[in-house]
Amino acid sequence: MTDSATPRDEASPHYAGYILDLDGTVYRGEALIPGAREAIARLRDHGRRVVFLSNKPLEPRAAYAAKLTRLGVETPAEDVINSTQAMMRYLRTRHPGERLFVIGEPAMREEMAQEGFHLTEEIEEIQVVVAAFDRTLDYAKLNTAHQALARGARFLATNADRTCPVEGGEIPDCAGVIAFLEATTGRQVEVVVGKPSRFMVEAAAERLGVPLERCLMVGDRLATDMRMGRTAGVDTALVLTGVTDRAALAASDVRPTYVLESLSELP
């Protein structure tokens, strides 16, 4: 891996689908990262497919698509994959028709219900407990999940992030929910579908309609974006516009396929 080895230089014709992280890759807060809009437009103009990833299950994908469109990157909701989408895909294939108790934001629960999933709070009915980020979390929800798990329900989670960045700092994320339930039940979460799990990349590739070997994962985080790409067997491109700098890259055992200053170095 060298700085000169970029998709623009040597491999771009190979990639038919691009999987782009959002925070730190496409935008920061309410502003596009310089060059992002132009890079995405070039990809689309050359017939490349593009989807966007977020580990956050806070809002439905339509909200992320609306933000991208508002910032100047016109995006249909179907081209956004977050951990809610990955979870629904996983449940459809592994636990079809099963009754769920979801610790999650109201928007997440509403979206899952609209997609036909059977959500219940009746402990004896619950077959799968889904843990996610939830700012409405209370003891009653934790107890319902605990009791269902004690009765043998499956234990899944959208993501394992310790904190969620917000304006002015960070707030506790799904890792705290997982840790609570693991501590009280003595069980371990069985599957986490969000980054760095391969399930996110597989969901994105399915949307792209492109084989994994012809996808490029682009993001700013070594431990999630780059590790996820490696786990899924896709090439990766680290952008230095987010949380990772060259010092962190040098100290890491995760080696991206490419290192880019920003999305502007994509073809």
Image (tube, rainbow, N blue to C red):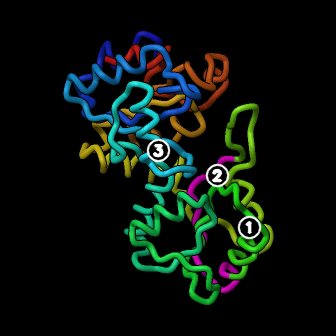
Residue 21: percent from left, percent from top: 47, 34
Cα separation, mark 1 vs mark 2, equals: 13 Å
Amino acid type, callout 1 = Glu
The vertical placement of 226 against 136, above or below, is above
Q: Is mark 2 on a helix, strand or loop?
A: loop
Q: In the picture, which quadrant includes the C terminus?
A: top left
Which residue is depicted at the point 62% across and 19% down?
245
- Magenta span includes 152: yes
- Residue 245: give its label: none
Which residue is depicted at the point 36% across and 45% down?
77
Q: What element carries label 1?
A: helix
Which residue is depicted at the point 71% across and 71% down?
141
**Rendered image quadrant of residue 39:** top left
- Can you identify the residue that label 3 sits on? 63
- Residue 160: give its label: 2
Residue 250: percent from left, percent from top: 63, 20
